[in-house]
């Protein structure tokens, strides 16, 4: 009878301790790996990028972005996303640089979140002619947004776990646009963790940790919290919910230029593309000036 009672209690209130410890720690390790790739402050959806495994710097701050695509240029600054001609780019970049400086001076922006106010990210499709890359770079270097960061995709070795019964609902929520997506995801997650008070507490306290990688804070807190509540959740469903919001399917890194450093002169074949031209840049490159000959 005591054995039967123990079995019933485990079924109702979680898992046996060794099984719970194993599953909790496996989930924690998976989430820490997922949270190690920070979400970039730009959108790479629908765009091809050069893939490199030697560029390791994270894009740690939001900044204006120029996307150089087959269809032309797109410029993103805060909440605006617009097609733009290369002839108009210099004026647009100058206006954005002035706005950033004004917001820093007035206190609307905090310097800790924008350590390099001259930062500009360039997302470039591999087939882009070298001449177009140079035209965009020249426009940037003629403004106060001269600390250019070339964005590259890097390999993603982490593979998604098996789908759970929650993934169909997650698919629908993640496909939505706007603020409704975040609200739905939060509600889905709330329902999954409510039976585990320590895990629920991890989420309720993470918002107060200003400046931290919140995904990593949660990832590190998951295993201890699950063990504390004897894994009284549906672990595959919790795994799906947390992994899907932390996982970066196409991680990126940036090669950052410092306009205060001497520029390395690189001779460019005008018939080449970004796929060839980017090979002239190495992680040791501090600044560059392309010369067409």
Image: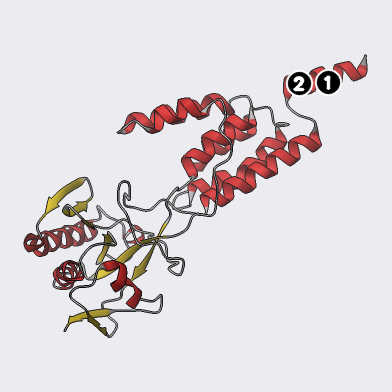
- Residue shown at the point (30%, 33%) measured from the top left: 178
Residue wearing tag 2? 11
**Residue 12 visible, this angle:** yes
Q: Quadrant of the N terminus?
A: top right
User: Extreme top residue here?
Assistant: 1
Image coordinates for residue 102, horizontal then vertical, percent: 17, 59
**On the image, which quarter does residue 282 sit in?**
bottom left
Residue closest to the eye, 23 or 159? 159
Q: Which mark is residue 209?
A: none
Disc 2 vs disc 1: Cβ atoms closer than 8 Å? yes
**On the image, which quarter does residue 194 sit in?**
top right
Residue wearing tag 1? 7
Instruction: Look at the numbered disc 2 and give the secondary structure of its residue.
Output: helix
Image coordinates for residue 56, horizontal then vertical, percent: 45, 66
Note whether 254 is above or below 244 in the view shown. below
- Residue shown at the point (31%, 57%) measured from the top left: 110
Q: Residues within 10 Å of mark 1 (few under 14, many from 20)?
A: few
Looking at the image, residue 44 sits to the left or right of residue 104; the answer is right
Note whether 144 is above or below 235 in the view shown. below
């Amino acid at each position: 009878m005591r054995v039967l009672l123990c079995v019933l209690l485990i079924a109702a209130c979680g898992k046996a301790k060794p099984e719970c410890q194993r599953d909790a720690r496996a989930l924690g390790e998976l989430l820490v790996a997922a949270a190690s790739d920070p979400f970039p402050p730009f959108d790479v959806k629908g765009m091809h990028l050069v893939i490199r495994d030697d560029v390791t710097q994270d894009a740690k701050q939001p900044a204006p972005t120029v996307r150089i695509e087959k269809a032309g240029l797109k410029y993103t600054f805060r909440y605006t996303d617009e097609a733009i001609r290369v002839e108009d780019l210099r004026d647009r970049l100058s206006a954005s640089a002035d706005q950033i400086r004004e917001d820093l001076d007035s206190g609307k922006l905090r310097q800790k979140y924008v350590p390099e106010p001259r930062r500009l990210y360039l997302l470039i499709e591999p087939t882009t002619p070298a001449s177009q890359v140079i035209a965009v770079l020249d426009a940037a270097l003629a403004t106060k947004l001269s600390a250019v960061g070339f964005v590259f995709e890097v390999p993603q070795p982490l593979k998604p776990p098996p789908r759970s019964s929650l993934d169909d609902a997650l698919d629908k929520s993640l496909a939505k646009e706007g603020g409704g997506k975040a609200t739905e995801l939060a509600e889905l997650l709330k329902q999954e963790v409510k039976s585990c008070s320590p895990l629920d507490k991890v989420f309720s306290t993470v918002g107060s940790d200003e400046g931290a990688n919140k995904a990593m804070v949660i990832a590190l807190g998951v295993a201890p919290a699950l063990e504390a509540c004897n894994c009284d959740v549906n672990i595959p469903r919790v795994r799906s919910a947390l992994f899907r919001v932390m996982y970066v399917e196409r991680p990126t890194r940036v090669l950052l230029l410092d306009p205060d450093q001497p520029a390395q002169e690189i001779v460019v074949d005008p018939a080449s593309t970004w796929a060839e031209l980017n090979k002239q840049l190495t992680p040791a490159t501090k600044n560059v000036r392309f010369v067409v000959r």
